[in-house]
Each structure stands twice: as C-alpha cells, then as structure tokens.
Amino acid sequence: MDIAAVDQLPVECISHIISLTTPRDACISSTKDLYFHLCHNPIIINNGAMSFSLEKESGKKCYMAGARSLCIAWGDTPKYWKWTSLPQSRYGFETRPVDFDVYFDGSDNGERRKVVLDPPANMPKLSQDRGNGWMEIEMGEFFNETGEDGTVVCSVFGFDDAKSGIIIQGIELRPKSGR
C-alpha cells in the first residue's frame, strides 16, 4: 500500500488513528504500521453507526453497518419491530428458508440466495460460526462495473409469512477473496 492510497482514506479515519498515538509517534509512524492498524482495528464512523477497516490480503476497504443504521420496513413501528439487545440469542430461521438479495443500485449483476441456518443434507450450508456466538451468512455478491459511488441494497425476504426472531447485528461489506 503506497502513501497515495492512505491519502484516499476519509479524514476522520486518519485523525482517529493519529489520536491513538503520541505526538512523536504520530510524526514517525510508518505507512505499514497504519495499514496493519486499520486491518486489525476497525474505526467507528458516522457517529457509531458504521465501522471502517482494510482487508489484510488486498488492502481493499471494508465497511460494517450496524443494525440501527439500516433502513428496515416498519423499523420504527413497535407493532412490527422491536429494538433489543440480545447478545446470547439464536436465530428464528434455523429450519425455515429466508431469501437474501444483494445488488448495486442501478445494476443487474446482483444475487439472491436462499439460506437456512441448519439445512438438510441436500442443501448447501451458507452460514458459518464466527466463533463469538454469532453466525455469519454470505448474503451474496455484486460488482460495481463503473467504479462510481452508489448505493448497495441488501434485503431479507420471507416466503409465506412475517419472520420473527431474526436478529441482525449488522451488515459487513468486504471484498471477495481473489479479486
């Protein structure tokens, strides 16, 4: 990663990193140190609603949007949605499928996946245990052909009725390995 790539980081990211060092170290820290710090220590941005980090292998940007920063249908209507903190919880679609859509707004190269957390033997397992009590689900992939800024749309759909017991900690956007 060269110094030009560091110049493309948001100012708040660089400011946060420098604030964690002594004045002397802030002046002499290497680009390599900064790179590894961003790989292992996500920076909280957007008033705590998101985090930013770098993917170690490629140096590509990773963003994580916390659940409260997501646009959720009826998210502010207590009849349909309840905001709670349940760190030891399990999910509500262990045996019933849920569809996930991921695409770059204005593009037709997105993907829809059907996910069951505990699938029967004839279905592929698309979820992974993160080792911290949470499951990770690969919702799909998309490619931004033009390289322009835009909106990434991530959706969750049920099949026959409303879903209950789904707990979303956040959505992480990161580069696919090998790209």
Image: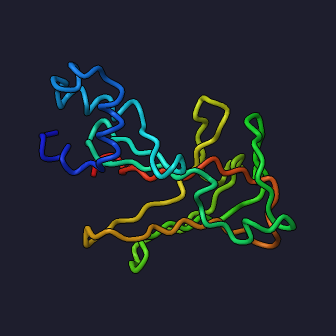
Q: Identify the image quadrant of the N terminus.
A: top left
Where does the image place residue 152, in percent across and percent down from the top left? 45, 67
Q: Residue at x 63, y 47 (%)?
A: 169
Q: Which of the pair 103/128 is nearer the observer?
A: 103
Left or right relative to 20: residue 9:
left
Q: Residue at x 72, y 46 (%)?
A: 118
Q: Quadrant of residue 19?
A: top left
Left or right relative to 163: residue 141:
left
Left or right relative to 161: residue 134:
left
Q: Residue at x 66, y 66 (%)?
A: 72
What colour scheme does the image use? Answer: rainbow
Q: Given the current orientation, which residue lies at the most extreme front position?
A: 23
Q: Which of the pair 106/76 is nearer the observer?
A: 76
Q: Quadrant of residue 73?
A: bottom right
Where does the image place residue 103, in percent across and percent down from the top left? 46, 70
Where does the image place residue 173, in percent across and percent down from the top left? 44, 53
**Is residue 126 visible to us here?**
no
**Number of numbered discs:** 0
Image height of 55 relative to 176, above or below: above
Q: Residue at x 58, y 34 (%)?
A: 130
**Is residue 92 visible to us here?**
yes
Q: Which of the pair 84/129 is nearer the observer?
A: 84
Where does the image place residue 87, in percent across and percent down from the top left? 73, 36
